[in-house]
Structures are given as structure tokens and as C-alpha cells.
Amino acid sequence: MSKQVLRAELQTLLQLSHPKISLEAFETTLQSITTSFDWTYFVERAIATNLAGYLLPHPEIAEKYYPDNVLQKIKSYQQRIQLHSSFLREEILQLAPKLQAANIPFALLKGWDLHFRQHISLKKRQISDIDIYIEPSSLNALNQLLQKEGFQTFGVVYKSKWHQKLLPQHAPLHAIKGAIQLDIHTDAFAAVHQIKLQLNFENCVLLDLNGVQIPVLSKKLSGQFLGLHLSKHLEALQQFKGAQIIDLLNECLSKDGLGPKEKKRMQALESFLERAQTMTFNARYPYDAFFLQQLEGTPLPFNLKMRQFAHRIKPKNDIVNSLILAFFDVFPNKNYLTQLYGNGSYWTLNLKRLKVLRHKR
């Protein structure tokens, strides 16, 4: 299969949103835009992929070349994500001392790790929630503390006891207070992802922010976690944002200490990132094909749908346990259905889940 040719708007989007773009390269790229350039499509895809926040690295140059309506949409996007993230950041600064006082070790993950450790601007990277890693033994204590702080907490509801035993979740607790959402992790990945990465507090770094201690992952461990997290999305062909690639451009993608399967994933990811930076995508690589489909916002092509389906039905355990899990995938327990669809008879709720009946709540 031949190399994929990007639309001019998408190629320009990737060039302008690169975190290391120089002032000269930024202006040269904007100067090369022709009159046929579709600015509406450009800004639509920039916002949809969360890349819009990176499009004003040199504001004085941007104001010379961006059409006024495009510039205002980008600024509006930045203001919106900054406002939401500011609420989340304030919650972290208030919550961190309380967790430490309660002797609950924790570390921030993903976007907040990047913000506090690398000083990533809240106007650039969209952060929707707060991801926190804790030890499984701290789960009950944290749940009680969050409820005391006004959060409504939700534990993971499994389809069956077999799912809970064989396919435990990596984020078994969620908490909501207004527009603030917390995802509490007790592992790097769920068992279903078949990715092993040991998160531990020995590899954490304590940052001091005006007397508040903010624990984050070490640079090496953070790079491994973010890299494997992106590979998880690419491998399963599940939605991800272009900004996840930018996350990795300043990270250390060390394979040191990883298992064979994880090293293989990182090697495939490194190869993909190299093509992404040079924009030499090739549709014969599933990572490339899926990234381009997400970048374009087009329907998933048939070959990727089949790959996605094959990934979903791939056994996650031995044959006997896989058959048991498959049975409960079709016939989950009543508590699971009630949590999703409210009260009703078992068969009515399950038919709604299977989309045989229309769901109304």
C-alpha cells in the first residue's frame, strides 16, 4: 500500500501544533497557505483532536496570518480549557495536603503529571479530569475522605464475579463533585489490556509548590506509562486525541525494565511517532491508518472495523475461563444492568443493553 497523502489542512495542523516549532518555521508554514485552504475544516479538526491549544505558540505571528474568526475560535478554545483546568488544579492543591495528612500515598498521572512536572500550559493541553494513583489498600480510606469532601463516589460494577476475579479494572473508583471528576487508579492498566507496568511510589518525584507537596511519576516511568497508554488505544483502535502524541515528544520512551510484550509495543510506538513527526504515514501500518482516520474524523474503514472486532473477541484468558467470561458478557448479573439502565426486569434491561430495545431513562 502506498504512502498516505494528507490534506493540506491536516498537514498544516500537525506542523503548526508541534510543541518545538520555531518562530521562523511557524511563520513560514503560515505564509505557505494558499487561497484554497479550508480554514473551517482546519479549525474544526484542530478542536476535535485537542490540538487547537497548541496553535498559538507565537501569538504575534498568529495574529498576522490567522483569519479573525479562526483566531477567535482558537482563543475561545484555550480560554475554555484553561478555565476548567484551573478548577481542577485548585482542587488538587486543596486535596493533596488532606491525602498526606490521612497517610494516603498517591501520585498524579497523565495530564496533571505533565503539567506539574513539565510545566505544560493549561491553555495548551486539555485536561478533562484528575487521574490519581494509590495503593489498593488505601481505596477504602480514600473513598471515605472523598465523601467527606463532598464528592459522590462510584465503585466499578462488574458484569460477574468472574469478571471481578479475572479481569479487574485499573481504576476501580470514580468521584464527582460538580464539574470535577476524579479517576482513582490502583494499577497502570486493567487486566483486559494485557499490559504490565508496575507503578510504585519508589519511582515518584515530590514537587514543592508553595509548600504543597505534589507527587508525580519519574520521567522514565511517566514516559513508559504514557507510551503504553497510547499504544493501548492504537492497538484496540479506540478513540484517542492527537494531543496524546504531543505528550510523548518530550518524554523518555525507555524500554528498560519492561517485559517482552511491552517492549514490542514501545518499539511499534517509537516507529509510529517517527513517521508522525515526519508525516510519512503508510496505510499498511494499522497505527498510521487509525491515527489518520481519527485526524480526519471519517468513519472507520472496513478493514479497521474487522481488526477492531478481532481485538474485541480475542481471548483474554485460557479457553475455559474465556468461555465463562463470554457467557457473562452476554448475560451479566442484574446489579450491573440496574446500575446502567435503572430498575426493570432482567430481560428488559439486558435487551436495552444489547440495543434490541430502545433505551429511555
Image (cartoon, rainbow, N blue to C red):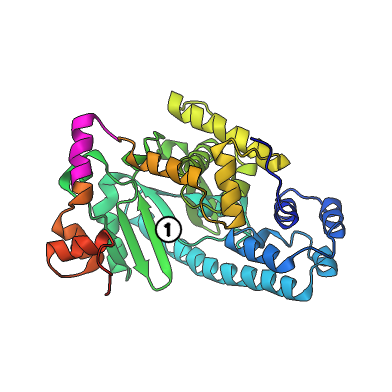
Q: Nearer the viewer, residue 232 or 39?
A: 39
Task: Check disc 1 and give the amino acid type.
Answer: Ala
Mark 1 lies on a secondary structure that is helix
Magenta span includes 321: yes
Q: Residue at x 59, y 59 (%)?
A: 50
Q: Is residue 217 visible?
A: no
Answer above or below: position of 162 versus 26.
above
Q: Position of residue 230 (x, y in %)?
A: 51, 44
Answer above or below: position of 291 versus 352.
above
Q: Nearer the viewer, residue 350 or 256?
A: 350
Dividing the picture into quadrants, the one containing residue 157 is bottom left
Main SS of the magenta segment? helix
Dividing the picture into quadrants, the one containing residue 74 is bottom right
Q: Is residue 81 visible?
A: yes
Considering the image in quadrants, where does the C terminus appear?
A: bottom left
Q: Residue at x 18, y 52 (%)?
A: 332
Q: Position of residue 44 (x, y in %)?
A: 64, 66
Q: Position of residue 309 (x, y in %)?
A: 39, 44
Q: Residues within 10 Å of mark 1 (few under 14, many from 20)?
A: many
Magenta span includes 242: no
How many labels sit on residues? 1
Q: Which residue is mark 1?
A: 96
Q: Residue at x 48, y 65 (%)?
A: 88
Q: Nearer the viewer, residue 241 or 303?
A: 303
Considering the image in quadrants, where does the N terminus appear?
A: top right
List the single residue furthest toward the left: 345
What residue range appears in magenta?
316-327
Q: Nearer the viewer, residue 186 or 18?
A: 18
Residue 197 left/right relative to 255: left
Q: Position of residue 18 (x, y in %)?
A: 71, 50
